[in-house]
Image (cartoon, rainbow, N blue to C red):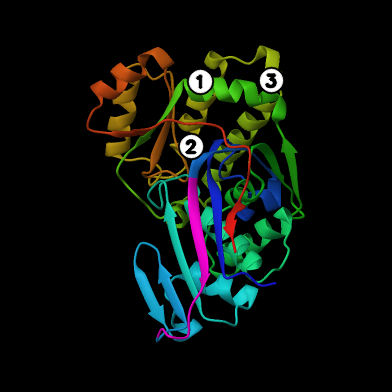
Amino acid sequence: MKKKIVVTKTPLRISFFGGGTDIAFFYKKYNGDVLSTTINKYIYVTVKEHGNIFNQTYRLNYSTSERKKKLSMIKNDIIRECLKIVKIRRPIYISTVGDVPNSSGLGSSSSFAIGLLKALHKFESKKISKKDLAELACKVEINILKNYIGKQDQYAAAYGGLNHFSFKKNSKIIIKKKNSHISFLKFLFKNSLLLYTGVTRNASDILKSQKKRESLKKLKLIKKLCNEFLKIKKNNLNLKIFCDFINNSWKIKSKLSNKTSNKKIDKIFNLCKKNGAQGLKLLGAGGGGFFFLIINEKEKKLFKKNLIKYKFLDLEYEPYGSRVIYQE
């Protein structure tokens, strides 16, 4: 039976190592590797049957509002293309709200695509696997909309948890759950913060600026760093080692293009280091969004006080991918 209303909850993610190697430009030649985890920050999507009494077929609420009679008139690219793919034939209301601003380095656009596709399938009583859900979101964002992005965000949002994603030259994706490292991850998050730079940016534009021959060498180093970290046994892993890897990761990443960092980003980075951050990297493509920083749990309060002009988020591990939390 088709549903009248469906609500999904889809997690955002933090990419620790390997970001950028999940783009076809790189993995089609060298294979790619990414280590990422989902966190307790979410995108919520509501899909509801829209009554005939309204003078529009599609009513959409996100950062703006749309009321359209025809599918082709919808301005939101992801909503329009997802509706086409799932073949929705009845009037529909769609709304979305997130825990963080869009375009801030936590994979929000892909989480939205995953959450919407999952809601639409449930709305039409259609089953879809995690793998198919991730691939369908990639099809929408990469193949149809031609966004120059990777595949890690869609897979993280669909599967959830701490994962090592291997992107192969033949386009096969291997997913390895890193459950043995979850106890360390929970400890890490107790000693971590997200700092919002106040700047949103277009990830696709920044990633395009990294599509050049000289970037390949740095992306190879980023991949190598990811694989070196994955070789560390859980009993040998500690906060200092993790900080060393995070700092090296940002050192390489910040030089991928002149759009990855800027004077404002550098200023925040130096301020955080000065006030006790042991590990620090800008999340996502760069250029703005959130800094992931590692600081002793006992020093968090003073750290926030010293950087009072900035906004912070505490973190927790999220083991689940996108899921339906309400339906009728």
The residue tagged 1 is: 243
Judge from the rendering whether residue 238 lies leftward or rightward of residue 231; answer left or right.
left
The answer to whether residue 52 is magenta is: yes
- The residue mark sitting in front, 3 or 2, is 3
The residue tagged 2 is: 253
Instruction: Tell me which numbered mark, 1 or 2, is placed earlier along the sequence.
Output: 1
- In percent of width and height, residue 318 lies at 58, 37
- Secondary structure under tag 2 reads helix
- The residue mark sitting in front, 1 or 2, is 1
Q: CA distance from mark 1 to mark 2?
A: 15 Å
- In percent of width and height, residue 287 lies at 37, 45
Residue range corresponding to the magenta coloring: 42-54
Q: CA distance from mark 3 to mark 2?
A: 22 Å
Circle 3 Cα neighbour tier, 10 Å, few/some/many (<14 / 14–19 / ≥20): few
- Secondary structure under tag 1 reads helix
The residue tagged 3 is: 232
Q: Looking at numbered disc 3 in the image, what kind of residue is underneath it?
A: Ile
Q: CA distance from mark 1 to mark 3?
A: 14 Å
The answer to whether residue 91 is magenta is: no
Instruction: Tell me which numbered mark, 3 or 2, is placed earlier along the sequence.
Output: 3
Q: Looking at numbered disc 1 in the image, what kind of residue is underneath it?
A: Cys
Taking the spot 39% from the left edge, 63% from the top edge, the residue there is: 62
Instruction: Tell me which numbered mark, 1 or 3, is placed earlier along the sequence.
Output: 3
Q: Viewer-proximal residue, 159 or 145?
A: 159
- Magenta span: chief secondary structure: strand
- In percent of width and height, residue 119 lies at 59, 63
Tell me whether circle 1 and circle 3 mark residues in contact (CB < 8 Å).
no
Q: Viewer-proximal residue, 21 or 307?
A: 307
